[in-house]
């Protein structure tokens, strides 16, 4: 199976919140042009659960590191890594908010994002596709 890569737009969700919240007389407003965002070619990794961002992407997004989480690698190693505040992830017109683990040098899209966006991996075509049962919008299982 070859790699599946996808274009992804990452946006600092706290910045977006400041743009949305602070409206009215005398209120401080963050101009939409100052919202931190970053576009990347991300690797879809179905063996990965979370969103993973390298340190340089976290810096470009202006994300705070809000805590630590133990990450377990495919070879069984465990390492305590930083966890970011919320990031808005956009793929193929679908968006979701998710915190990210900070490690490595590649943006990784894991299972939680695929599930929440209702996207399927087409391995032979090396691409992501909307769930054929819900092609127009994600439907989440509860």
Image: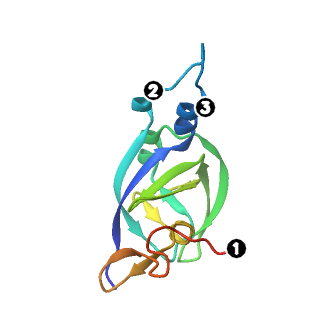
| Residue 118 screen position, x and y as percent | 51, 72
Residue lying at the far top in this picture: please name it: 26
| Residue 116 screen position, x and y as percent | 56, 67
Q: Quadrant of the C terminus?
A: bottom right
Whole-number angstrom distance, CA of label 3 to CA of label 1: 30 Å
> Which quadrant of the view contains residue 129?
bottom left
Q: Is residue 67 left or right of residue 102?
A: right
Q: Earlier in the sequence, mark 1 or mark 2?
A: 2
**Which residue corresponds to mark 2?**
31
**Which residue corresponds to mark 3?**
21
**Which residue corresponds to mark 1?**
142
Whole-number angstrom distance, CA of label 3 to CA of label 2: 12 Å
Q: Quadrant of the N terminus?
A: bottom left
Q: Is residue 103 above or below residue 18?
A: below
For numbered disc 1, what is the local secondary structure? loop
Q: Is residue 23 above or below residue 78?
A: above
| Residue 6 screen position, x and y as percent | 35, 65
Are the two marked residues, 3 and 1, in contact with CB atoms closer than 8 angstroms? no
Give the total number of marks visible in the rendering.
Answer: 3
Are the two marked residues, 1 and 2, in contact with CB atoms closer than 8 angstroms? no
What residue is at 45 percent from the left and 64 percent from the top? 108
Q: Earlier in the sequence, mark 3 or mark 1?
A: 3
Whole-number angstrom distance, CA of label 1 to CA of label 2: 37 Å
Q: Is residue 77 visible?
A: yes
Tell which of 85 and 89 is nearer to you: 89
Tell which of 28 and 112 is nearer to you: 28
For numbered disc 2, what is the local secondary structure? loop
């Amino acid at each position: 199976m070859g790699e599946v890569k996808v274009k992804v737009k990452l946006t600092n969700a706290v910045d977006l919140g400041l743009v949305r919240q602070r409206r009215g007389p005398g209120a401080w407003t963050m101009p939409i042009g100052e919202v931190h965002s970053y576009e990347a070619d991300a690797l879809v990794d179905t063996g990965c659960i979370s969103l993973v961002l390298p340190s340089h992407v976290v810096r470009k997004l202006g994300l705070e590191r809000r805590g630590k989480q133990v990450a377990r690698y495919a070879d069984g190693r465990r390492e305590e890594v930083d966890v970011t505040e919320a990031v808005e992830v956009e793929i193929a017109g679908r968006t979701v908010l998710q915190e990210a683990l900070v490690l490595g040098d590649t943006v990784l899209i894991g299972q939680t994002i695929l599930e929440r966006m209702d996207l399927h991996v087409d391995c032979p075509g090396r691409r992501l596709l909307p769930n054929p049962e819900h092609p127009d919008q994600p439907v989440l299982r509860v």
